[in-house]
Image (cartoon, rainbow, N blue to C red):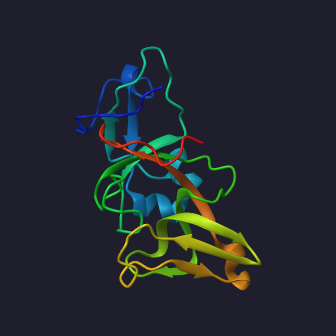
Amino acid sequence: MRLLTDDARIEKNPPEMVRFATHLPVFDLQVVSRWGAMAYEHVVDEVGWVGLRITPGTPLPRWWFVSRIEGHGLDDGVNGFRDGALALFDASPREALPGIPFLIRGSFTDPELGAYTVRLISRIGEGRIVLTSLNPDRSQFPDILVDASHADSVHLVARVVQPLLSQYRPLDSR
């Protein structure tokens, strides 16, 4: 299945027949981070819908959505995860896998976003969680360390699958 788009126009009200066939809903990332899975269960309304180039007949999972990346933590300058870029998200994260980017909320403070972030989970163990920035400017966009006493407050809201620009590849296909 190919989930890329060259033309990321957000449509307000596409025909019902294209929803989850060739189009996915677009949500506000801050709202999704507050509500978690409940946001996807229509506690909040979508901003619109975006069409994707996919193999004909391939259904799109109903737990996938599109949102604009917020912050600079995933932006390494080449991977397409720029602040404001549209990206594909999977709202059914099963487990935290090291090296996989996630939308995460918890009792930590991201210097840009506050109580949520878009980062890689690079290490889990010794009671600590490290939310890793890919941005080379570590003075402005540092890793976020969550100690054991706050580890239970970390919630995986959604896995970041890929940016929606055809010149970029996913970080990982898991």
Residue 122, percent from left and from top? 60, 66
**Residue furthest to the right:** 126
Identify which residue is drawn at 40% across, 74% down: 113
Identify which residue is drawn at 54% across, 53% down: 158
Identify which residue is drawn at 36% across, 58% down: 69
Q: In which quarter of the image is the C terminus?
A: top right
**Residue furthest to the top:** 57
93 left or right of 70 in image: right
119 left or right of 17 in image: right
- Asked if residue 130 is positioned above or below residue 53 in the image, the reply reads below
34 left or right of 10 in image: right
- Asked if residue 8 is positioned above or below residue 45 in the image, the reply reads above
Identify which residue is drawn at 38% across, 85% down: 139
- Asked if residue 8 is positioned above or below residue 154 in the image, the reply reads above
Task: Give the camera-side residue of 122 and 39.
Answer: 122
19 left or right of 10 in image: right
Count of picture labels: 0
Residue 145, percent from left and from top? 59, 81
Residue 109, percent from left and from top? 49, 82
Residue 61, percent from left and from top? 54, 32
Task: Give the camera-side residue of 26 and 117.
Answer: 117
